[in-house]
Amino acid sequence: MNAWCWLNANSGALQSLFAILGAVLTVASIFVLTVTWRAIKRQALASELQADAARALTQVAEEQTKAAKDAAASAKTQCDLLSSQLELSTAPLLVAEPDDRKDMRNYKLVNRGQGMAFQVYYWQGGLEVKDQRANPIIPVQPSTLVPGSFVYVPIPPAWLSWTVRYKGIDRQERWTTVYRDANKGQEHVMRRGLQEIYLA
């Protein structure tokens, strides 16, 4: 009973004390919330800075990759150019010229390249019939032509075009297609790997 009386007697003081404690707790809660909010804001700013840094690093990596690709493409171009120069310095090039003798039915097959031509033979028609074997294949004698050498080849008047096939020291196949029509001239083709490349 004494406790109940004491509480009744001191209820105003207790209410003031609880009000003060509530205010202290509210201030403490506000302080904790403010500190937490600032920490979250700092963390968000740090995360944003990290994201910016990651984006910058990604951009730098992309630029480095592009630069590496450009350097590789440039190196490949230089390698192809050097390979072509080396090839031209050792490659044969057979050219058909009119016969300089009295017999105008013949042609003179001249090696105007820098390398030897091996396994020389020819057939009627263009390059498109090279794998059909429908036309007879005629070997050239001698079948090897050194640079500057030539051989006469008899071409029947009915042939409107004929193709010479030969190989160089690199064992790559090469072809020269000759047309009787002066406007068409000659076509020079070589095999590089699995590709057939028309030479200018």
Image (cartoon, rainbow, N blue to C red):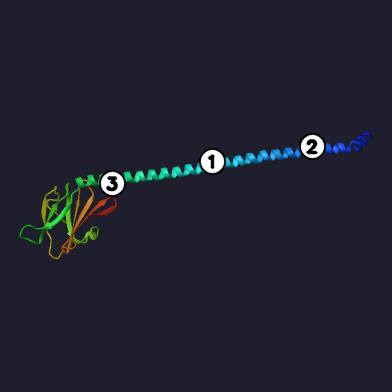
Is residue 72 visible to the viewer in this orientation of the structure? yes
Quadrant of the drawing holding the C terminus: bottom left
Q: Nearer the viewer, residue 19 or 39?
A: 19
Q: Whole-percent x and y of residue 67? A: 38, 44
Q: Whole-percent x and y of residue 131? A: 24, 58
Give the image quarter of residue 24. top right
Amino acid tagged 3: Asp
Report the residue at 72% width, 39% height from top.
29
Report the residue at 60% width, 40% height from top.
43
Report how many numbered discs are placed on residues in the image. Answer: 3
- Whether 36 is drawn above or below 104: the answer is above
* Foreground disc of the pair 3, 1: 1
- Whether 135 is drawn above or below 27: the answer is below
Report the residue at 20% width, 45% height from top.
89
Residue at far left of view: 102
Q: Earlier in the sequence, mark 3 or mark 2?
A: 2
* Left or right: 190, with 9 as reference point: left
Give the image quarter of residue 177. bottom left
The residue tagged with tag 1: helix, strand or loop? helix
Amino acid tagged 2: Leu
Residue hosting label 1 = 50
Is residue 137 visible to the viewer in this orientation of the structure? no
The residue tagged with tag 2: helix, strand or loop? helix
Q: Earlier in the sequence, mark 3 or mark 1?
A: 1
CA gap, disc 2 to disc 1? 42 Å
Crowding at mark 1 (Cα within 10 Å: few <14, some 14-19, many 20+): few
Residue hosting label 2 = 21
CA gap, disc 3 to disc 1? 44 Å
The reply to whether discs 2 and 1 touch (Cβ–Cβ < 8 Å) is no
